[in-house]
Amino acid sequence: MDILSSLKLVDVERIRLHEPTESVRLGRTVQAIAKEGVLRNPLLAIRLENSDYLILDGAHRTGALKRLGCKRIPLQIVDPSQVDIGSWDHMIPAGTWLQGLSQHPSLLWTSVFSNDAALLAKVVDADGAPKFVYLNGEQTDPMERLKMWHHIVDAYNKDYPVRRFPKGSRLYPEPGMILLQYPTCTLEDLKDIVMTGHKVPAGVTRCMVEGRLLNLRIPIRLLESREVDLKEWNQLCEKWAEQLRFYSESIYLCEV
C-alpha cells in the first residue's frame, strides 16, 4: 500500500519534540514497550526545514525508546496539509495552585475578554462565570507569554489529576472542579517554537491526522542499532501491506 511509503526510520538525534514529557506517564510507557518488546504505532512527524523531524504525536513513546537505548525511531511522515492542530481542555480539582496563579504579579485576571491572540487561558469554575488570563501590563514578548503559559500548566500538572477533553466539548465543571481552556497554536507556531529551542506545555496541543498507521508492532530490537536489517524491514513492510485494513467510518475507542 502507498501509505507504507510514509514510514521512515530516523536517527534519534534528528528528532524534535514540541512538548515535554511527564515523568509518571513516561515511566509507564517505558514499562509497557519493554514488556511487549514492540512499538505498536509509529510516531507521527513532519520534516523541518533543517532536515530534522518534528514529532506531532508520540512524545512519551519517543522518550521511552530513547530510554530503552534505541538508536532509530520509526516515523510516519505526513504532509503539513494533512495536519489539523487543536488543543485540549483541562479539568482539574481546585486547590492552592489556583490561588497561587491568581496572585501572580505577571498575570492579569479579568472577566472581560480582550483578544484571542494575547490570551493565555480561559478559566471556568462551577459557577460558570469565566475568567480570562493575560500577561500583566504591556508585555508582548512571545517568549514571556510562552514562559507564563508553562507556569500556568506546571502549577497543577504534577500534583493534581488532569482530565483532558477536546477543545469545544462544551463542558461545565462540577463543584470543586476547574476547567482551563487554552488557545490553539498553528503548525507554523509549533515549528517556530521548536526551531528556537523551546516547547509548548505538556498535554495542551492536540494534533490530528487522517490515515494513521496503527498496530504495526515494530520489534524494538530492530531499533537498537544504527545499521538497520533492511531485509527484515522490507519483509515486515510486505507483511503489513497484506494485513492493513482501511476504515473510513467514524469509531469510538475506549482508551484504558
Image (cartoon, helix red, strand yellow):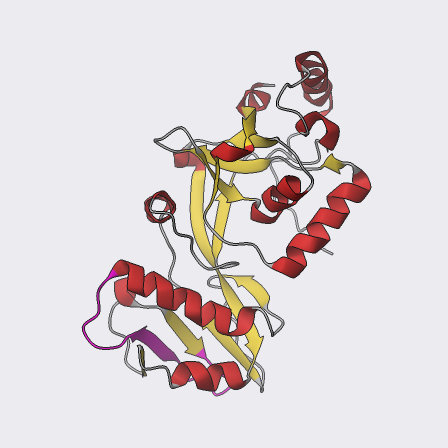
- For the stretch drawn in magenta, the main secondary structure is loop
**Residue drawn 66% across the image and 36% down it:** 214
Relative image position of residue 143 (x, y in whole percent)? 30, 59
Image quadrant where residue 233 sits = top right
Quarter occupied by the N terminus? top right
Image quadrant where residue 239 sits = top right
134 falls in the magenta region: yes
Between 97 and 128, the one lying in front of the other is 97
**Residue drawn 71% across the image and 35% down it:** 215
145 falls in the magenta region: no
Instruction: State whether residue 128 appears in this view.
Output: no
Quarter occupied by the C terminus? bottom right
Relative image position of residue 205 (x, y in whole percent)? 47, 54
Magenta span: 124-141
Residue extending furthest toward the left: 138
**Residue drawn 28% across the image and 75% down it:** 113
Whether residue 53 sits left or right of residue 110 in the image: it is: right
Residue 161, placed above or below residue 2? below
Instruction: State whether residue 151 appears in this view.
Output: yes
**Residue drawn 50% across the image and 65% down it:** 89
Residue extending furthest toward the top: 231
Residue 36, placed above or below residue 222? below
Residue 51, placed above or below residue 2? below
Whether residue 162 sits left or right of residue 121 in the image: it is: right
Between 99 and 90, the one lying in front of the other is 99
Relative image position of residue 55 (x, y in whole percent)? 50, 41
